[in-house]
Amino acid sequence: MKCPKCDFNQRRNDGMTCSKCKYEFVFDPKVDRLSGNTKITDNKMIHFLNLTSANNTLYFTAQQFKARIELYLHKMEKKARFISFIFAGILSAIILYFLSFPRRKAEGNIFIFMLCIPVFLILLNAVHKSIRGRIRIADDHIKSLLQRWKNAGNPVPFLIDKPRLHKPPATPGFDDIYDYGVERLLIVQRDELVDLFVLNQWHTQNKTLVLAESGYPNYLNKQAREVLQKDPDLPVFLLHDATRSGMMMAQRVQKLPWIELKEHRVVDVGLSYNDVAKIKRLGRKKNDLTAHVDNIPYMMLASGLGTALVGGLAFADLLEKPEDFGPMDFG
Ligand SMILES: [Zn+2]
């Protein structure tokens, strides 16, 4: 394992402390896994954190971090599938060769060749079964990896692990949306999505007042009611996950205790299961099309959502460009 501090190539058998610079490794390649047999190392952790936060310039949620790792696992899976295909082909050819050895008649060989096709398919299926399912990571596992990393003394300041905008910001500049003028209201399903859009300044760039379904941040409830009263045509957008609860959001918002929406135009731009099936980068199989809004990389989410709100376009259609996986070498 390579030391992230001094680049020294430490042998695991020499312990979890870098022999050269005394750096304490957090993740043990002997036991710690991302998923299946895929190891997590300190260098990989740093790499994924840098990718998700765009080198500490963007705030991000644990779901975004998870999605970034799942993209990597997805790529690894593709590689493994390719190797297994070659492997099964070579093995089938060897079997074919030995089975056909005693016979030299062409008809017999064709018969054995036909027999080899199911052998090839069975082998391939067995390898694929062992790979399948490894590209998804449980939310708890991601949280525990992040927690261990932080507990070891590595701060992750751009991680939104709990909502932090309960009070009006003390520093001017964070909440100057009224200087820009509010052109629309966005109600998001989860509190941390408010933080994602506000801390990354998406709300001011898009002149959008962002609140969660729960009413968070409560100090903005009054302003939200006021802008709707002032302009009855002000559009209201809903952003939710492709989950059972997300699908019910449009019904729930009609009975919110902190705002009355009945008279207003409410447009649902949330993720549907159909959208998830279309967004290839999410790598979802047909039998599980659940996904969170923030499983979409921030830059795509931010620009896609902005365009969707202005142009009234379908959200998923804006997100179908092929994904750039970025460099994946960890040394
Ligand atoms: Zn070192």
Image: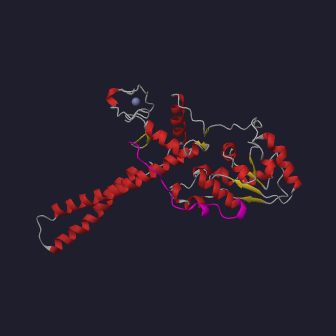
**Would you say residue 293 sits in the magenta stretch?**
no
> Would residue 163 appear left or right of 18 to someone viewing this image?
right
Q: Residue at x 39, y 53 (%)?
A: 129
> Would residue 320 appear left or right of 329 to someone viewing this image?
right
Q: Nearer the viewer, residue 229 or 93?
A: 229
Q: Nearer the viewer, residue 252 or 270?
A: 270
Query: Relative to residue 326, is residue 111 depicted above or below?
Result: below
Question: How far across and how far down the image is residue 160, in percent?
Answer: 63, 39
**Would you say residue 322 sits in the magenta stretch?**
yes
Residue lying farthest bottom?
107
Q: What's the magenta region?
A: 309-331
Question: How far across and how far down the image is residue 72, in percent?
Answer: 46, 49
Where is ligand 1, by quadrant? top left
Question: How far across and how far down the image is residue 283, in percent?
Answer: 50, 55
Query: Relative to residue 306, is residue 111 depicted above or below?
Result: below
> Would residue 62 appear left or right of 4 to someone viewing this image?
right
Q: Residue at x 60, y 36 (%)?
A: 157
